[in-house]
Amino acid sequence: MTSRCKPRNRQGGPALKMLFPKGAEDTLQPFYNTSGQPTGAFIRPTGAPYSITGIPGTTVGTWQSVTVTWKDQTKWRFTPLGSVYVLTRISNRMDRYIDLVWDS
């Protein structure tokens, strides 16, 4: 499993590009409030089998973490490692999880 999220600039503010193992990718555009701050919600592609939430970082355009929740209620959490966001936790719908640790 090599899914990851990568920062990507796009009109309307910084977006994330989610890359899938077989080469597919989705662009994830965050929602912003009237002050221009990200709300933690993302616009997901039409028909995507998941929803996305994030915890904004202290630097504009960065995230402390981004969580993908799949239709079956499993969750993948991505956190920053260098210039990409790597998969660091997989949780089942009972909130049992495994943490993944990456070398830089």
Image: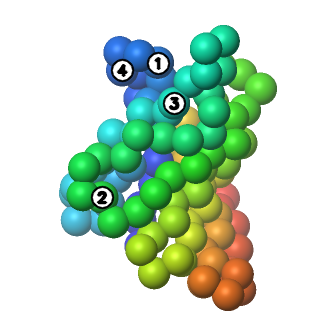
Gap in Å between the C-alphas at discs 3 and 2? 17 Å
Q: Residues within 10 Å of mark 3 (few under 14, many from 20)?
A: some
**In terms of sequence position, does the residue under pointer 2 or pointer 4 come before the other?**
4
> Residue at coordinates 63% horizontally, 78% vertically from top-left?
91
Earlier sequence position, callout 2 versus callout 1? 1
Residue 15 location, x and y as percent? 44, 30
Residue under numbered circle 2: 48
Q: Earlier in the sequence, mark 3 or mark 1?
A: 1
Disc 4 residue type (three-letter): Arg
Mark nearest the camera among 2 and 1 is 2
Residue at disc 3, secondary structure: strand
Q: Secondary structure at mark 4?
A: strand
Residue lying at 50% horizontally and 52% vertically, measured from the top left = 52
Other-residue count near label 2 (Cα within 10 Å), few / some / many at <14 / 14–19 / ≥20: few
User: Could you tell me the amino acid type at mark 2?
Assistant: Ala
Label 3 sits on what residue type?
Phe
Residue 101: x and y in percent read 69, 67
**Nearer to me, 9 or 38:** 38
Q: CA distance from mark 2 to mark 4?
A: 20 Å
Distance from Cα at disc 4 to Cα at disc 1: 6 Å
The residue wearing badge 1 is 13
Category of crowding for the residue at label 1, using alpha-carbon neighbours closer than 10 angstroms: few (below 14), some (14–19), many (at least 20):
some
**Rendered image: mark on residue 10:** 4
**Which callout, 3 or 2, points at the residue further toward the start of the chain?**
3
Q: Is residue 91 visible?
A: yes
CA–CA distance between discs 3 and 1? 9 Å
